Image (tube, coloured by chain):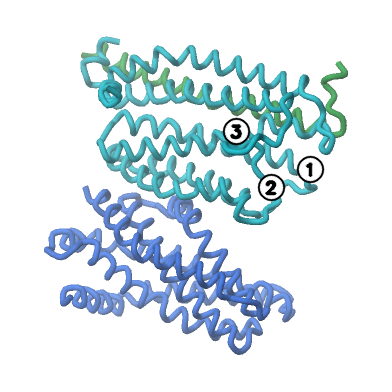
């Protein structure tokens, strides 16, 4: 248990040193989400209609573009090999690493999203639902992103390739997430989409680290 | 010539036919080209040794 | 007895010999079946009372859609065999299925659009079946691109196989999407359990086409995987004797 906690704190410390990388993701999310009210005619009904898809897209895109920072620097300075050599379970270490990445990139994003939602004229309980949806979906997406960045580790400009691999797997998350947000704004039942999101989150929490560690081992040869 | 006329859906039916055949042949010729390329490669390797 | 056959054909020279032998037969048989099916479907089968002549697109759309899924299943199984038994033959087969699969999926989408425009008034709609078939295309493209981007061959094989295996989950989604959700796409015409919801004179060209596409697929894969095996094993003795 101690090792995992040490890894977690080490990742957080490193994140503070590389705060520009962390900020990129959050700023991207902010900009994308702000762009749409700015360039459209900011009609209240229109904005309420698009806030669901926009939020999911912004979160997806922001995590996509900052994905490379997950494993690349550690791959280059050899720390992943150190993790492989340790006595602890590699899968568990990968899980902790990805979880700490989520903590310092997505957690601030979720807090900020409440502010952005109010720009879209969202009120009351729906703002909390948006944050909950983003919490569940960002946790899911971060493990999918980890797998994709692990499998494309040696490649020099993997951007387009990662998008190609990630889109099929992430699409259900995005669809159910935006459905949940839409339903909460219209006052309809949100339990359906939220159950699906939670299910997918559980799936990616359990399978993600295992698949990512397999991909890392393949890339490390 | 009358049986070749598919009524108001003429364009759609025949374009699907044409494009299906095109794609099928494309897949075969792609595999054929790879095979020829492989043959040329191993002839080159064997001639040299 | 069956296992012995697998081990025998699992070795590259035996595989090559077997595949080169059956390929011309499959090619001509496939072409013949497709020709018969096309003529049967386009001219012999009677007009549909609802859709008129437009329903004839079914003879091109259904086989390609069916092939797009079968090919992916084959690619997934070949990838699993390749990873578990570290078989070069299996990886060659998987790699040669990918371009065929991508083209066939694109064909299924295009013929579907050509059928949708006169039928539903719209060429495309983001319902469950069409979206998941589009995702299938992305999976094929991702496999091809990933394999091409990694320079080291063994690593490329295993990484791409991982992606292929993950994508297998998409197949039941595509297949059951018309059952689970209310989609614009119609339900299955042919099912293993019930009798088909299509009359005999319209049915036989469809079956002939599906079988013809499958046999043609085998011919293409024979060609492609034999080429791939040759390239991989170019330094070994049995290749020198060709």
Same chain under badges 3 and 2? The reply is yes
Q: Colour in which chain C is shown?
A: cyan
Q: Colour in which chain A is shown?
A: blue
Quarter of the image holding residue C82?
A: top left
Label 1 vs 3, first from the N-terminus? 3
- Mark 3: which secondary structure? helix
Tell me what residue is drawn at x 34 percent, y 34 percent: C91
Which chain is green in the rendering? B
Tell me what residue is drawn at x 63 percent, y 84 percent: A122
Tell me what residue is drawn at x 64 percent, y 34 percent: C62
In this picture, is C184 found above or below B14?
below
Q: In screen coordinates, is C92 left or right of A1?
A: right
Q: Nearer the viewer, mark 3 or mark 2?
A: 2
Tag 2 residue: C185
Tag 3 residue: C64
Q: Nearer the viewer, mark 2 or mark 1?
A: 2
Label 2 vs 1, first from the N-terminus? 1
Asked whether disc 2 touches disc 1, contact meaning CB atoms under 8 Å apart, the reply is: no
Q: In screen coordinates, is B15 left or right of C165?
A: right
- Mark 1: which secondary structure? helix
Q: Quadrant of the C terminus of chain C?
A: top left
Subunit ID for the residue under disc 3: C
């Amino acid at each position: 248990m101690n090792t995992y906690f040490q890894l977690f704190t080490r990742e957080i410390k490193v994140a503070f040193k590389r705060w520009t990388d962390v900020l990129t993701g959050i700023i991207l999310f902010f900009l994308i989400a702000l762009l749409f009210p700015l360039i459209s005619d900011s009609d209240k009904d229109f904005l309420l209609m698009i806030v669901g898809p926009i939020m999911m897209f912004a979160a997806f895109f922001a995590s996509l573009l900052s994905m490379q920072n997950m494993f690349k620097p550690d791959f280059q300075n050899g720390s992943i090999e150190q993790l492989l050599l340790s006595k602890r379970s590699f899968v568990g270490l990968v899980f902790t690493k990805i979880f700490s990445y989520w903590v310092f990139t997505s957690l601030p994003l979720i807090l900020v999203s409440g502010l952005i939602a109010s720009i879209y004229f969202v009120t009351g309980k729906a703002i909390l639902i948006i944050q909950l949806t983003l919490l569940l979906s960002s946790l899911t997406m971060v493990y999918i992103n980890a797998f994709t960045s692990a499998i494309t580790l040696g490649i020099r400009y993997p951007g387009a390739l990662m998008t190609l691999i990630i889109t099929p797997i992430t699409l259900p998350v995005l669809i159910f997430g935006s459905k949940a947000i839409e339903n909460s704004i219209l006052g309809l039942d949100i339990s359906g989409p939220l159950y699906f999101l939670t299910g997918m989150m559980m799936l990616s929490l359990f399978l993600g680290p295992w698949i990512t560690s397999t991909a890392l081992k393949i890339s490390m040869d | 010539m009358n049986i070749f006329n598919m009524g108001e859906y003429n364009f759609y039916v025949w374009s699907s036919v044409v494009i299906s055949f095109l794609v099928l042949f494309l897949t075969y010729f792609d595999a054929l080209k790879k095979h020829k390329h492989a043959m040329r490669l191993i002839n080159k390797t064997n001639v040299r040794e | 007895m069956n296992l012995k056959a697998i081990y025998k054909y699992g070795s590259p020279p035996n595989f090559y010999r077997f595949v080169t032998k059956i390929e011309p037969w499959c090619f001509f048989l496939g072409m013949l079946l497709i020709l018969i099916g096309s003529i049967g479907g386009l001219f012999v089968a009677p007009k549909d009372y609802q859709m008129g002549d437009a329903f004839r697109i079914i003879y091109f759309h259904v086989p390609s859609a069916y092939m797009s899924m079968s090919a992916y299943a084959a690619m997934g199984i070949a990838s699993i065999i390749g990873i578990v038994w570290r078989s070069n033959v299996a990886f060659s087969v998987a790699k040669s299925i990918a371009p065929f699969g991508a083209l066939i999926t694109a064909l299924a989408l295009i013929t579907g659009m050509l059928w949708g425009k006169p039928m539903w008034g719209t060429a495309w709609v983001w319902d469950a079946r069409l979206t998941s078939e589009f995702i299938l295309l992305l999976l094929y493209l991702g496999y091809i691109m990933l394999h091409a981007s990694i320079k080291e061959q063994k690593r490329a094989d295993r990484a791409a196989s991982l992606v292929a295996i993950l994508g297998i989950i998409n197949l039941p989604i595509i297949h059951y999407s018309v059952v689970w959700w209310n989609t614009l796409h119609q339900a299955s015409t042919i099912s293993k359990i019930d009798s088909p919801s299509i009359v005999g004179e319209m049915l036989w060209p469809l079956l002939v086409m599906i079988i013809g596409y499958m046999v043609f697929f085998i011919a293409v894969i024979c060609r492609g995987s034999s080429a791939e095996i040759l390239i991989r094993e170019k330094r070994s003795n049995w290749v020198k004797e060709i």
